[in-house]
C-alpha cells in the first residue's frame, strides 16, 4: 500500500511547530503580563530556557511508575488532539486526519490529558497535589458542560460532526460560525477561559493555598514534560477554536494572527482578576455560560 | 458518614505563609476542623539579648523585631526610656517622629495590599503596590540611611535633622501616592471577584472582639472605634486632626476597607505634620550614650502600628543594661489564639487570606 | 564527525546557559531578609528579567535563599528543604547573620556560620542586603554556573558525613530521612 | 494635681476598699500600679474585668528578680471606657515557680502562659496546653532566667567563625593596621574597657 508521504511529514512537523509556537506564546504572555505590571519582564524565549533547564536536571526524584506516566499521558493527549485538528485548511501537509465524528473524539481526548495528570499527581502522595487533583477534576466538570452544549448546538445547526465539513461551510468571511451561532461562541469562549487555567480559574495550581497543587511533587524532566505538553495543548486548543468559530486559516500568518487574538482573551482577563474558589468557579460556569449554551441549542432546534 | 480527616501542614515552607510559621490544619474535605499555630522558627531571643546590651546598644536590635514595620518598636522603646528617665523630647523631634511613624504605616499598608491580593490570586496588585512602596522607602533612605531598618528614633529625639529640601520631596511623594489610590480601588477594592473572595470570610464577632484582645484594623473592622492615637495620644497626635475609620462586619472585606480609609488619613496626617513642623533642636543629647545609667523604674507604653496596638513593658533596675524589655505585638494574639478560632470552619483556600487580613507577622510572636 | 568529548562540551554549554538564565527560588523566607525579596521580584527591581522566578515547592526549585539568621528550629526544616531539591541546586546566604552570626552573635538559638551546616555558593553581605545587592549576588551565581564552578551540591554529597556531624551537634533529636537519592 | 485624675483616683479608691491589702497608687496620667499578694490575683482580675470594666488584657509580663529570688508577674489591663491602664504586680517564689491560670478570663492569656512556662519554667496549673511553643527539644534550664548565660551556651554549641574573639573596636583595628596612634576618644569608648 502506497505511503502517503505528506501525512507522515505532517505528523512529524505539526507537534514541533506547535511546541515552538506554544512556547513563544507562553513567553509573549509573560512579557505582556510584565508590561501591564509596569516592569520589563523576561525575554520571549524564557519559557524555552525554563524547559531546557528542567530537562537538564541531573537528579529526577519520582515516587513510582505512575508519576512517569502522568506527564506521558498529558503529552499523548495534547499531541493526539493536534493530529485531528486541521491546522492549515487546504495544504496537503497540515490537514492531518479527519473522519466523521472527530468533534466528539476531540471532546474526549482533551479530557484524557488532565485525567492522566491526575493519576500521576495522585501517585506522589503529597496532600497538596491530592487536593489540587480534586479541585482540577471538579472544575473540569464545571467548564465541560457549556463547552459540550456549544458544540452540540453547532453540530445540529450544520448537521455534521466532521471538522472539515465545518471548515467547508465557513468559506467566506460573513459565513464564520461566530456570526452564524453567536450564543454557541459565547458559551464556548467562557468555557475556554476555564480550559486555559488562567487567573479567575487557576484554583487548581494556586500557589498561595496548596503550593502549586498537582505538580507540587513534579520536578526536573517530569515538570519539563508537563510544560511541553501544556504549550502544545494550548496551541492545539487555539487552533481548534479558530477552526470551529473563525473559519480556520488558509496560510500560516492568518493562523498566527487569529490564534494570538484568541489567546489574549484568557491572558488579559487573567491579569486583572483574582481567582475563584472551586465552588465559586463551578457556580460561575453553571450560570452564564450554561445559559448561553441552552439558548444556543434552543435557537438551533426551533 | 463523617468525611475522612487528613492533617495538612500549612508548613513553614509555603508560598501562602507571610513569613515563617506553621499552621497545622485538621481538614475534612475542604473545610478546616481544627487549627494549631506552631511558631518559634524566627526566635532570636531579643529580650535575652537586650538584657546583655546597654540602653543605646539595644536600639539597633529592637527595630529588627517586626519586619514589615520596624518604626513603632524604636519609638516605643525610646518613649519608654524617656518616661522612666523623665527626659524631655524637643517639639521638633516629636513632629519628625510622627512623620516617620505615619510613613512607615503607609509602607506597611502597601505591603499588606500586595500580600492580600497576592494570596487572592491577583498578581498585578503586589507588583504595583510593592513598587509604589519603594518611593516611601527612598524617602526613608534619604532621611535615615536605611530602607527598612531605620535606627533613626532613639532616646531623647531623633538621630539627625531633616536633610535639605526633604519636606517638599515628602509632599511630592504623598501627591503621587494619593493619585495612585483610585487605581488600586479600580483593580482591587472594587473588583467583584475580590469582594466575593473577601466578604463574609474570617468573621470576628463583635461582642467577643474586645475580650479576645483584638486590636487595630481587625477591631475597627468589627465596628468598634478604638485607636491608640486617639485614646492615649502620644507624641503630637493630639495636635493633629484625623478620623478613625471603622467598618461593620468583622470580615476580611471590612478590615480591608478600614486599612484603605486609613491610608488617606495617614497621607493627611503627614501633610499636617510637614506644615506645622516647628524649628529648633531635634535631639536632647544623652551625655555619654555607652555609659548611661537609667534610674530604676518601669514603664508601659503603646503605639498604634499598622496591625494594631504595639505594647512595650520596660523595667530598669538602675544599672547600665535594661532589667527586662517585654514586647507585645498585635500578632501575638492575632496569630495564635485568634487565628486558631477563626480558621475553624473556613475553607482551605481562605487560610492565607485570613492570615493576611489579620496582619499576622511571625517574628513578632516569638521575638 | 564529532567525537563524544566534543559533543558533550556543546551539550554542557547549552545546559549551563539554560541553568544560568532560569533560576527558580524556593518560596521560603527563612529570616528577616525575606522582606527585601518582594521589592527584588516586583516591578521596580524586577528579577524576572534575569529569569529568576519563585517556585512553590523545593522539587521545582534550583536556588535556596537563606535570608538572614537561622534559628535551630528553622535549620532543621531548611536541611530537609535543601535535600528535597533536585541536583544542580545552589544556596545563597543573605546578610551578615549567615557569615558570622551578625547582630545575634550571642543568641542561644541562632547558628553563627551557615557553611558548617549547608554548602553555600554565594554570600551577600549587609544587614539585610538591598535589592541591588541581591541581584548582584544572583549575577555572581550566574557567572559561577556558567563556568560550572557552582558545585555546592557536589560538595554536600561528597563530605556528607562532615555536614551531618555538624548538623547533629546542633539539632537534638534527629528524626530526619536519609539523603540517599 | 488631683483635679484631672478623677477617674484614676476613683478606681484606686474602689480597689482599696474591696482589697484592703492591695497597695494601689497613681503612676502618671491614666496609669495606676497595683501591688498584690499572689493568692489575691485571680479574684482581683475577675473583679477588675467584671466590675471595673478592665476588659482588655493588654500585656502579661514576667520579670526575674534573681537578687530577691522571686519572679514578678505583671498583668497590664486596659479599660476602654475609663481609658486607664492598670499594672497589676505580684511576686511568686523563684524556686518552685507555680501559679494559677487566668485562661478562663482572657483566652490570649494561654499563649502568654505557654511562653512563660517555656522561658521561665513557671508551671501554670489549669492550663492544659503548656506544650512546646517556641523552643524545640530544649534541654538546658529555661533560657530567660537571668542565671542562664546565653553567651556561654552559644560558645559551646555553635561554631563561631574565627576573627571575632576579642570583639575589638573597629577603630582600633583600623588604626593598628595603618600604624597611627589610637585617638583618645577611641580609647575611652573601647569595648574591652567596658567589659
Image (cartoon, rainbow, N blue to C red):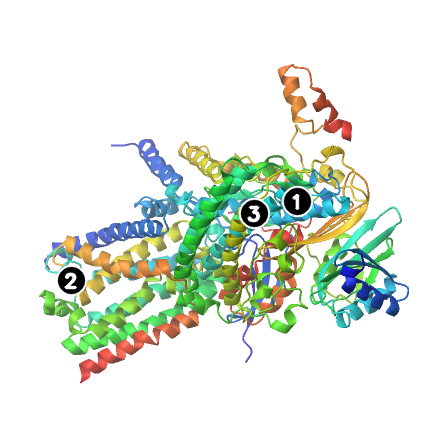
Q: Secondary structure at mark 3?
A: helix
In front of the other: label 1 or label 2? 1
What kind of element bears circle 2? loop
Q: Eyeballing the image, is A161 above or below B13?
A: below
What is the number of the mark on residue B62?
1
> What is the tally of numbered marks visible in this picture?
3
Instruction: State the residue position of label 2.
Output: A248
Q: Is residue C156 left or right of residue A240?
A: right
Please state which of residues B268 and A18 is positioned toward the viewer in this rendering.
Answer: B268
* Residues packed near mark 2 inside 10 Å, few (<14), some (14 to 19) or many (20 plus): many
Compared to D151, does A233 lie above or below?
below
Label placed on residue B276:
3
Q: CA distance from mark 1 to mark 2?
A: 66 Å
Q: Work out how far the residue at label 1 is from the one at label 3, CA to CA, in angstroms.
A: 29 Å
Measure the alpha-carbon separation of dots 3 and 2. Answer: 69 Å
Q: Nearer the viewer, mark 3 or mark 2?
A: 3
Tell me if mark 1 has few (under 14), some (14-19) or many (20+) residues whose alpha carbon lies within 10 angstroms of its own: many
Q: On the image, which quarter does residue D102 sit in?
A: bottom right
Q: Are marks 1 and 2 on the same chain?
A: no
- Identify the image quadrant of the N terminus of chain C: top left
Relative vertical location of residue D134 with respect to residue A174 in this rendering, above or below:
above
> Given the image, what chain letter belongs to the residue carrying mark 2?
A
- x%, y% of residue A188? 26, 70
Q: Are marks 3 and 2 in contact (CB under 8 Å)?
A: no
For residue D67, say whether it is visible: yes
Task: Report the chain holding disc 3.
Answer: B
Looking at marks 1 and 3 on the same chain, the residue that comes earlier in the sequence is marked by 1
Q: Foreground: D54 or B284?
A: B284
Amino acid at each position: 500500500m502506497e505511503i502517503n508521504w505528506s501525512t507522515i511529514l505532517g505528523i512529524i512537523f505539526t507537534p514541533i511547530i506547535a511546541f515552538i509556537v506554544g512556547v513563544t506564546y507562553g513567553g509573549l504572555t509573560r512579557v505582556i503580563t510584565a508590561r501591564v505590571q509596569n516592569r520589563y519582564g523576561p525575554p520571549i524565549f524564557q519559557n524555552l530556557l525554563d524547559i531546557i533547564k528542567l530537562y537538564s536536571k541531573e537528579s529526577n526524584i519520582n515516587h513510582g511508575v505512575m508519576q512517569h506516566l502522568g506527564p506521558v499521558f498529558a503529552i499523548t493527549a495534547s499531541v493526539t488532539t493536534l493530529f485531528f485538528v486541521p491546522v492549515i485548511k487546504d495544504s496537503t501537509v497540515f490537514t492531518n486526519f479527519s473522519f466523521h465524528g472527530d468533534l466528539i473524539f476531540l471532546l474526549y481526548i482533551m479530557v484524557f490529558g488532565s485525567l492522566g495528570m491526575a493519576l500521576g499527581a495522585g501517585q506522589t502522595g503529597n496532600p497538596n497535589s491530592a487536593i489540587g487533583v480534586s479541585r482540577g477534576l471538579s472544575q473540569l466538570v464545571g467548564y465541560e458542560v457549556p463547552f459540550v452544549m456549544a458544540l452540540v448546538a453547532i453540530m445540529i445547526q450544520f448537521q455534521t460532526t466532521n471538522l472539515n465539513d465545518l471548515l467547508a461551510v465557513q468559506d467566506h468571511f460573513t459565513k464564520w460560525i461566530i456570526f452564524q451561532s453567536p450564543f454557541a461562541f459565547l458559551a464556548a469562549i467562557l468555557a475556554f477561559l476555564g480550559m486555559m487555567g488562567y487567573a479567575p480559574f487557576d484554583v487548581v495550581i494556586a500557589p498561595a493555598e496548596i503550593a502549586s497543587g498537582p505538580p507540587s511533587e513534579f520536578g526536573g524532566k517530569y515538570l519539563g514534560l508537563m510544560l511541553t505538553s501544556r504549550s502544545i495543548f494550548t496551541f492545539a486548543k487555539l487552533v481548534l477554536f479558530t477552526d470551529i468559530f473563525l473559519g480556520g486559516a488558509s496560510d500560516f500568518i492568518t493562523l498566527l494572527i487569529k490564534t494570538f487574538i484568541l489567546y489574549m482573551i484568557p491572558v488579559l482577563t487573567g491579569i486583572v482578576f483574582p481567582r475563584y474558589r472551586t465552588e465559586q468557579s463551578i457556580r460561575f460556569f453553571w450560570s452564564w455560560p450554561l445559559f448561553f449554551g441552552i439558548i444556543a441549542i434552543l435557537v438551533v432546534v426551533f | 458518614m463523617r468525611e475522612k480527616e487528613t492533617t495538612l501542614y500549612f508548613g513553614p515552607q509555603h508560598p501562602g505563609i507571610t513569613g515563617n510559621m506553621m499552621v497545622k490544619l485538621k481538614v475534612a474535605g475542604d473545610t478546616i476542623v481544627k487549627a494549631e499555630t506552631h511558631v518559634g522558627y524566627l526566635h532570636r531571643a531579643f529580650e535575652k539579648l537586650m538584657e546583655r546590651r546597654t540602653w543605646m546598644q539595644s536600639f539597633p536590635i529592637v527595630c529588627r523585631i517586626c519586619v514589615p514595620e520596624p518604626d513603632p518598636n524604636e519609638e516605643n522603646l525610646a518613649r519608654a526610656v524617656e518616661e522612666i528617665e523623665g527626659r524631655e523630647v524637643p517639639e521638633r523631634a516629636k513632629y519628625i517622629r510622627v512623620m516617620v511613624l505615619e510613613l512607615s504605616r503607609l509602607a506597611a499598608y502597601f505591603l499588606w495590599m500586595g500580600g492580600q491580593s497576592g494570596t487572592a490570586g491577583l498578581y498585578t496588585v503586589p507588583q504595583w503596590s510593592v513598587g509604589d512602596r519603594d518611593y516611601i522607602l527612598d524617602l526613608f533612605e534619604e532621611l535615615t540611611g536605611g530602607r527598612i531598618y531605620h535606627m533613626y528614633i532613639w532616646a531623647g529625639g531623633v538621630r539627625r535633622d531633616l536633610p535639605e529640601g526633604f519636606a517638599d520631596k515628602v509632599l511630592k511623594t504623598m501627591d503621587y501616592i494619593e493619585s495612585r489610590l483610585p487605581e488600586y480601588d479600580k483593580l482591587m477594592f472594587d473588583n467583584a471577584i475580590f469582594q466575593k473572595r473577601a466578604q463574609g470570610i474570617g468573621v470576628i464577632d463583635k461582642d467577643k472582639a474586645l475580650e479576645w484582645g483584638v486590636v487595630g484594623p481587625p477591631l475597627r473592622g468589627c465596628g468598634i472605634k478604638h485607636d491608640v492615637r486617639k485614646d492615649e495620644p502620644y507624641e503630637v497626635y493630639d495636635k493633629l486632626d484625623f478620623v478613625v475609620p471603622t467598618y461593620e462586619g468583622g470580615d476580611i472585606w471590612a478590615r480591608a476597607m478600614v486599612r484603605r480609609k486609613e491610608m488617606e488619613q495617614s497621607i493627611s496626617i503627614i501633610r499636617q505634620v510637614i506644615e506645622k513642623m516647628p524649628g529648633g533642636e531635634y535631639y536632647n543629647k544623652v551625655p555619654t550614650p555607652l555609659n548611661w545609667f537609667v534610674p530604676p523604674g518601669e514603664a508601659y507604653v503603646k503605639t498604634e502600628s499598622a496591625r494594631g496596638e504595639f505594647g512595650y513593658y520596660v523595667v530598669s533596675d538602675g544599672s547600665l543594661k535594661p532589667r527586662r524589655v517585654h514586647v507585645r505585638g498585635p500578632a501575638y494574639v492575632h496569630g495564635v489564639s485568634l487565628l486558631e478560632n477563626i480558621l475553624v470552619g473556613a475553607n482551605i483556600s481562605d487560610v492565607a487570606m485570613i492570615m493576611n487580613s489579620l496582619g499576622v507577622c511571625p517574628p513578632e510572636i516569638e521575638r | 564527525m564529532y567525537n563524544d568529548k566534543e559533543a558533550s562540551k556543546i551539550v554542557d554549554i547549552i545546559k549551563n546557559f539554560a541553568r544560568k538564565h532560569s533560576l527558580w527560588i524556593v518560596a521560603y523566607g527563612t529570616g528577616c531578609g525575606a522582606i527585601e525579596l518582594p521589592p527584588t521580584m516586583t516591578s521596580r527591581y524586577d528579577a524576572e528579567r534575569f529569569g529568576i522566578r519563585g517556585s512553590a515547592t523545593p522539587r521545582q526549585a534550583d536556588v535556596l535563599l537563606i535570608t538572614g539568621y537561622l534559628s535551630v528550629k528553622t535549620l532543621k526544616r531548611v536541611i530537609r528543604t535543601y535535600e528535597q531539591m533536585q541536583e544542580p541546586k545552589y544556596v545563597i546566604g543573605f546578610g551578615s547573620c549567615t557569615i558570622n552570626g551578625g547582630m545575634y552573635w550571642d543568641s542561644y538559638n541562632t547558628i553563627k556560620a551557615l557553611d558548617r551546616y549547608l554548602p553555600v555558593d554565594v554570600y551577600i553581605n549587609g544587614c539585610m542586603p538591598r535589592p541591588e545587592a541581591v541581584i548582584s549576588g544572583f549575577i555572581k551565581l550566574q557567572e559561577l554556573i556558567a563556568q560550572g564552578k557552582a558545585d555546592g551540591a557536589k560538595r554536600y554529597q561528597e563530605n556528607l558525613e562532615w555536614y551531618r556531624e555538624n548538623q547533629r551537634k546542633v539539632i537534638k533529636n534527629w528524626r530526619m530521612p536519609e539523603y540517599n537519592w | 494635681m488631683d483635679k484631672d485624675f478623677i477617674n484614676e483616683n476613683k478606681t484606686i479608691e474602689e480597689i482599696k476598699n474591696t482589697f484592703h491589702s492591695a497597695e494601689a497608687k497613681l503612676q502618671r496620667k491614666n496609669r495606676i500600679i497595683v501591688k498584690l499578694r499572689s493568692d489575691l490575683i485571680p479574684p482581683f482580675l475577675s473583679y477588675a474585668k467584671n466590675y471595673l470594666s478592665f476588659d482588655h488584657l493588654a500585656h502579661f509580663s514576667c520579670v526575674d528578680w534573681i537578687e530577691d529570688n522571686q519572679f514578678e508577674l505583671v498583668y497590664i489591663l486596659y479599660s476602654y471606657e475609663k481609658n486607664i491602664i492598670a499594672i497589676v504586680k505580684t511576686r511568686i517564689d523563684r524556686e518552685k515557680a507555680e501559679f494559677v491560670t487566668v485562661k478562663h478570663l482572657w483566652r490570649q492569656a494561654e499563649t502568654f502562659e505557654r511562653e512563660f512556662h517555656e522561658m521561665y519554667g513557671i508551671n501554670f496549673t489549669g492550663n492544659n496546653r503548656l506544650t512546646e511553643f517556641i523552643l524545640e527539644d530544649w534541654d538546658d534550664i529555661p533560657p530567660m532566667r537571668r542565671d542562664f548565660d546565653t553567651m556561654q551556651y552559644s560558645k559551646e554549641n555553635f561554631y563561631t567563625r574565627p576573627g571575632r574573639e576579642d570583639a575589638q573596636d573597629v577603630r582600633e583595628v583600623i588604626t593598628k593596621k595603618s600604624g597611627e596612634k589610637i585617638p583618645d576618644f577611641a580609647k575611652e569608648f573601647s569595648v574591652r574597657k567596658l567589659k
